[in-house]
Amino acid sequence: MRVSNLLPILTAAAGGFVAEASLLRRDDSIASNDTSSAPIPNRYIVEFAEGVNPQQAASDLVNAGATVLKIFDSDVFSGASVISDTHNLDTLQSLAPVLRSWHSKKIKITAPIAAPQTFGPAAAGAGFSVHHMTGVDKLHEAGILGKGAKVAVVDTGVWYPHPALGGGFGHGFKVAGGYDLVGTWWGYNTSDKLPKPDPLDGLGHGTHVSGIIAGQAGSYVGVAPEASLYVYKVFGDYADYTETDTLIDAFLMAYRDGADIITSSVGGQSGFSDDPWAVTASRLAEQGVVVTIANGNDGANGPFSESNGSNGEYVLAVASVNADVIAEAAFEATFGDNTSKKITVPYQASDFWDSTAYNGWPIVPFNTNASAPTDACHAFNDGWNLNYTNSIVLVTDGACSWQTKLSVLNALHNYTLPILIYTSQYPVSAFFNGSGDSTVGYIPLDAGEAIMKALRTGVKVTADFKNTVEYLKFLPSPAFSSGGRPSYFSSIGPTNDLALKPDIAAPGEDIFSTWLDDSWAILSGTSMATPYIAGVAALYIGKYGGRKVHGPGFAKDLSMRIIASGKSLDWLADPLNPGNSDFRAPVFQVGTGLVNASKILNYQTSLSFSKFMLNDTHNFERYHSVDITNNSPHPITYTFSFEASGAIDTMVPSQDPSGKPVVGVYTQVFAAPYAAIPSVSLPRGTFTVQPGKTKTANINFMYPSGLNANNLPLYSGKIIIAGSNGESLAVPYMGVGANVHKDLDSVFYYGNGLPVITSGLRGTPIGDSPSWSFNVNPFAKSYPTFRLAFNFDTTEFRWDVFDSTWKEKDWTYPPVVGKKGYVGAASLWLNGIPLLIPNTSLVTATPFTDIPRSIGGSDAWLWFGKLANGSQLTPGTYSMRLAALRPFSTNPQNSDNWDIFTTPQFQVTP
């Protein structure tokens, strides 16, 4: 069986809570905070002004010294992708045909939280389904299967030979169309894109997504099995990233090809709704295309961790919720030397065990005392079996953590032991392996006791880990036992401009779907939840038609049906110990909650696209409304109520000596929810809507009192609209109990020695040696290294160089070369500390825009003396200004709206 190229990519991805430790330390080690949205050197996207001919505008760009890579000639987005080493965002935007400019960025797959476990073709008969959770099963029973809907998947491609995906590609097949925009080898050994009409997948991610939407084989049925798929491949088979302009191109191509729905499980931490991909996606929704994009898997990092494209205003940003069944691997335990007795044992592990590594290995007891919960809690104990070579060690749960047990066992065998822990808590709600390289798994108590009973009587027990359908089990999820909870990894909003995201949630944990080479796989992530929502939209379109039938407003109408259907979820304080809580999960974590497909297709009440975004206390939006349409043949009387979710404090003290507040990680900010209930004025009196009519409901808010603004509180909930016909819909609200601009005292993180500029082999601070020759030889390093972290997001970072006479009172925005002492903007090396002589052409011109807060350490930005216009700074004395725009600063001309890192004048030597 083919090994997916996604596997080595995922091993490099940060998983879940691994990043938490470095964030809590706030150490100053150089670490990549999030390279999933890094600017690409010399690459830009520009949008042309309305009415400008894109071909002529592209010609003007060439005349201005830029190289045009791609022209976007669309009524949705008119612009171009360009290369230039003599421009920056300021100068590009000053050109006559340009309305707006952005850096093109690398965008990564929304990586699953663990490597996939794969199973052979026979697994199609295993019968996995979560449709009973969402009402999709009832729609299937009614014959609603998505026939006629066209769903575009923008991802890694699709393994269309898979029987569950139709076995072919093109007209008449389930995968009816699509395109490869980059080529197989792009991003690996070539920077040249080699597009082709065949979107065959080499990574597997897009295949898994496609199966969730429309797969069908054996007893497996996707959400909309009769929908047509159009797949647009934007990743090479050996790269984990694509680019902003490639995603825009793919979305526009899908739009031209007539897609009713575009779905993409791609993105990285961003949180800005003016991202060019997000803008394009939102405009497509305004043209009638339903757009679903993964909200991201950065939930462990706390609030304000939204993804790229999902931030578009009318894009459905999809969160993940625990399924009420989980797919688990299993092994066969054979008792005795013959095959007379065998049992199939499901197991949970942080990394799924290799299908052949431990085959035939004996299971040996750590302690044959069945009632010894202190198994492996201490270094020595009489009666232990110390012969573990080529064996799987069985221990009991309890008395100490599994980490302790693992440490004790591994001390004996140098981190090579496979270990099984049997527990009455199986299946466990969450599991993380953070110790050494050993494999550790949990098994059910009854299986462990049966094996231990045999071992105590001298019966040999061996394990077989073959990956076949017989070794796949579907078990009740403990996380769903009290009504359902969010997935801990699902990224948490709001956006950095306080827009309410995510919008809706769907099952995304331990999801079983199609994989490469006609096989099947289990994956978890918002990548799995997002295509589920796309499939639900396809069911609606299959029954009622899409944008061709209903026009441009259709997507907003259907998106609101989806949003309004959500079922509230329980609070999740700690994924390792969920516990119970009286609070509901906040809408900035799960949107309105778990999608209800039956409501979407069957309800006769519809709402205008409405999300009550209250903003912060200074920019508070008090007055809101929603239009309610009665599509039934009878009058409906509506009543209104509100449902508050738990509130959180976003800021917590950092772990460095300064104790300065930082945005907390998940387990910090969700540990202690509290009530923060706004004053709400709902419609009074009888509110009746006649058949076929629409009536506006006005709803007014006032933010909660008594909140600690220094902690940047987030509060949220839903307005419930209930009809006399039994229908109940929801509109979400969210606000911040602080004046963000005023109450956040800094954008840069000031602590643990940051920010700082150093140079030379010894890292001499700028105050001690403000002089550089810009010799990039690794034995000289005569250039400044700016080490920094962002405490909060910024819409703009600038590194501007002025002559020696310049003072802050001379600041003007944007500065123009040659005026008021302005020399130019620095072009920075963003690729870490070079060990060899760096390629100084691979620098990125400042200013940078839309920078999210730092996660997991600090960055090192190096300046080799190159300016944005391509020139090298000549010897002399200069001033420089390193500054980040404060949140909600409406006037960058005002110096007080910038967080400025003060530096002394510096000299450039020959």
Image (spheres, helix red, strand yellow):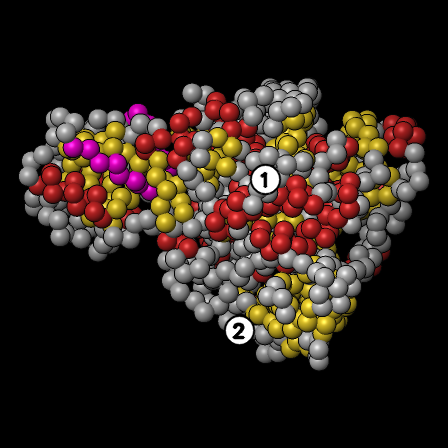
Identify the residue at image location x=27%, y=44%: 443
Tell me which corner region of the image, top left, top right, bottom left or bottom right, holds residue 275: top right
In the rendered image of this protein, does residue 107 appear above or below residue 592? above
Residue 91 location (% of width, % of height): 85, 40
255 or 65: nearer the eye?
255
Residue 145 location (% of width, % of height): 59, 40
In the rendered image of this protein, does residue 164 appear above or below residue 784? above
137 or 213: nearer the eye?
137
**Which residue position holds label 1?**
145
In the rendered image of this protein, does residue 867 appear above or below residue 635? above
Residue 370 in sight in this render: yes
Q: Hey, what amino acid is under mark 1?
A: Leu
Question: Which type of secondary structure does the marked residue at label 2 adopt?
Answer: loop
Residue 92 in sight in this render: no
In the rendered image of this protein, does residue 597 appear above or below residue 349? below
- Is 90 displayed left or right of 570 in the figure? right
284 or 600: nearer the eye?
600
Residue interval drawn in magenta: 341-357
190 within the magenta span: no
Question: Which type of secondary structure does the marked residue at label 1 adopt?
Answer: loop
Q: Quadrant of the C terminus?
A: top right
Numbered tag placed on residue 215 in the rendering: none
Tell me which corner region of the image, top left, top right, bottom left or bottom right, holds residue 329: top left
343 within the magenta span: yes
2 or 1: tag closer to the N-terminus: 1
Residue 897 location (% of width, % of height): 75, 60
- Is 3 displayed left or right of 541 in the figure? left
Q: State the residue lying farthest toward the front.
A: 633
Packing grade of label 2 (10 A; few <14, some 14-19, many >=20) is some
**Which residue position holds label 2?**
675
